[in-house]
Amino acid sequence: MAAETPAPLLDVAELRVAFGDQEVVHGVSLRIMPGECIAIVGESGSGKSVTARAVLGMAGSTAGMSSRHLRVRGRELGSASEREWQRVRGRDAGLILQDALVSLDPLRPVGREIEDPLRIHERMPPAERRARVLELLDRVGMPDPALAARQRSGELSGGLRQRALIAAAIALDPPLLIADEPTTALDVSVQARILALLDEIRSRGTGLLLISHDLAVVGGLADRILVMRDGEILEEGTRDEVLGSPTTAYTRQLIAAVPSGTPRGVPLVVADRERMPTPDATAAAPHAPDTPGSGPLLRLDGVVKTYRTPDGASFRAVDGVSLELHRGETLGLVGESGSGKTTVARLALALESPDAGEVVLDGVPWSRMPERRRRPLRHRIGAVYQDALSSFDPRWSVGRILSDALPVGSAAGVAGLLDQVGLPASVAARRPLTLSGGQRQRVSIARALAASPEILICDEPVSALDVTIQAQILDLVDRIQRERGLACLFISHDLGVVRHMSDRVAVMRAGRIVEFGDAERVFASPGHPYTAQLVADSPRLVP
Amino acid sequence: MSELELRQTTVAASAQHLLLTRRPRLPRVGTLLAFAFVLFLVVATFAPALVATQDPNLIAPTEAFRAPSAAHWFGTDESGRDVYSRVVAGTGTSLLIGVSATLIGLVLGLALGLLASFGGRIFDFGVNRVIEVLFAFPGLLLALLVIVIAGPGPVTATIAVGLSTAPGYARIIRGQFVSIRSAPYVEAARVLGRSPARIVTRHVIPNALVPLFVLATLGIGQAIVWAAALSYLGLGAQPPAAEWGAMLAAGRTYLATAWWMTVFPGLMIVGTTIATTVLGRALARRGKDA
């Protein structure tokens, strides 16, 4: 076996998967060699996750599967029974899922979870098994393997949990590893470390099938990229072919949708780029001068916010933050989860009052005035939230949500708002629950605009959306910000997004602002080591 | 994590959307049966003459202790009264006690729940302690205590049952208000500059009421059982009156020879409880979909 050309680890030809009479994967073929990383990229609903599961016989009992052949390490498994599949999973192929919190049993220590494949597939004395678990946890870069093995999944951070899951997947050293969105929902620095770990595993000869909606994420790792849409492979090639000279319009659209590297003011949606040919150099750096004599529109002056943790200790979420938001500018606030970004937004919205320092809105002591006096001024600040759906009353239709937000609600006013965010007037009759994620976020933006605010605060408005939808929403926010001359506080953990959207940017870490300045300057030549680290960790398209 | 939740809701939403557009949900057979039974109870309450076969209090000593037959569907009692007609006549009393007891419980619970969730820390603490103390007693024991103080009779039995169900409602209502008050959409309304009064009336109460209505429907069954239990003990409606609990008590003596005197009123209590519960659950399912 060693003498011949190595057999592919996974060889699938014309895989079809159907749920009921609806086929969702239409004849996908792929082949993974040892030490090779194949990436499937596509938006939600493209069938990429179903494909990843189907090649391990895990598409679900309601799925109808057929293929010309489906071979794992040369063994035909096209019509394998569940028993046969069980022998393949774990031993021949490991699976890493997106969210480790639901993939790990919350009531069992992580070490036990990792032991499972060892207990099921190998006859190994318990002591040896435990030693192997520690070795695995060490290999995936767990800072304290002995401690982690005793902890439950809820006690670990998102990144460590994902590592634990990878440890379980590689416990038996399977030659093939399938990772479905392994870094989605993780911070950039954690994502960079997980990707590096996967790369290290691959370099030892493991074949890797990587699934993601983000081209930038797979760009650094994949040897070959398969672009998938509506259950079909649209384009396939080496990384350089697909990223460098894409042949289909859809791939070009996906590449354009990646915000990092696209200058401020250039639409991320390709179709809109032609309509707005060259970005106005002056518009790209407006730094809109405030009207003479007046200060910044919103000013945070040394604000501090401390929370009490359940065990009685206090936690300083925001630790002396000072910011100035000027008319007509977009100020980006970037940082990892837990850095205090959202608390800053809540302080700016006066949903929380600072323990020290103050927030000043256009010369008025915003954080100090009683709520009763603040209420009539609240229309000056609009807010767009990360989870649009939960920010709508579940009993209300889109029309009622918008007409309630308008100073004088009317059907015409609602239609006008919907039109501004690119939705047809017919959406007014629908409930937010029946809308797609992108549509919901558009309604959320329309609501924020209803009272004609001067300031727009966007807290992670696109982090739950696919890149292509994200591109549309970012373009929309950018257009509205320019058209209305809004001052926009744009919060995101995604450096690429913030860089694309902002005139100036503040980098936040552990409640403090570590760097502040012109967006291009900060990202091109970071002055603080933390910023430099963030920039280095951010996935980029261009190798 | 919130992203995952969002994705899950998106998936649930799209699945639900498919369900709504493709297959309109048909009521289940059980729900239809329950609905028919409740309809019968409503007719028996408001127009007993329509469904009864004779006067419930017509005494005919010669007809005493007849087993169920074509003439007397549910048989007759020791005085020759028609058990079926008495069961029908008792519907109004039994339902009235059940419904009003639930209403009393709900109104009290609503008041306590509102006080706890909007009255500030001190009220929240106080109301919660009172609820906990009341919870320490089994519900029926609490009702007995009330009757010991106020004396037996249908009115006091109703009040007693209502009082003893109030703590349960209060706790659930408080939980509802507290969770809705901190919901993101309530916060969004604050950002829009809405006053607390407007937020409570437009968002908090309407969203809390839907589950409350379901809860009340489920509660009626329990209230009827408790009211019947009190009557059975002779503390609610008194024997000559046609009330299901009282009929049970009256038939107890003849259980060995005339089983129909207790079985049929008993079946009515069981049937009513099941029917209202099934309807309550159907409502809860609909509430989730809407």
Image (spheres, rainbow, N blue to C red):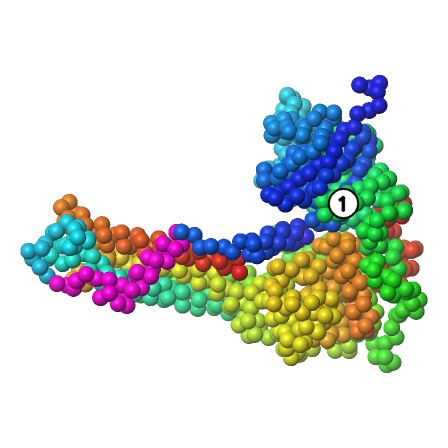
Question: Is A275 or B154 nearer to us in this picture?
Answer: A275
Kind of residue at badge 1:
Met
In reply to whether residue B52 is colored magenta, the answer given is yes
Q: Residue at x 73, y 36 (%)?
A: A14
Q: Is residue A291 visible?
A: yes
Provide residue A312's location: percent of width, then percent of height.
62, 54
> Where A310 sits versus A128, above or below?
below
Provide residue B11's location: percent of width, then percent of height.
63, 51
Query: Chain under label 1?
Result: A
> Where A174 sits versus B232, above or below?
above
Mark 1 element type: strand
Q: Quadrant of residue A456?
A: bottom right
Question: Is A189 or B94 nearer to us in this picture?
Answer: B94
Residue of label 1: A228
Q: Residue at x 67, y 30 (%)?
A: A78
Q: Residue at x 79, y 58 (%)?
A: A471
Highlighted magenta segment, given as a residue range: B30-58
Q: Is residue B188 visible?
A: no
Q: Quadrant of residue A65?
A: top right
> Where A70 sits versus A393, above or below?
above
Provide residue B219's location: percent of width, then percent of height.
38, 58
In reply to whether residue A11 is colored magenta, the answer given is no
- As drawn, is B183 to the left or to the right of A171? left
- As drawn, is B284 to the left or to the right of A522? left
Q: Quadrant of residue A411?
A: bottom right
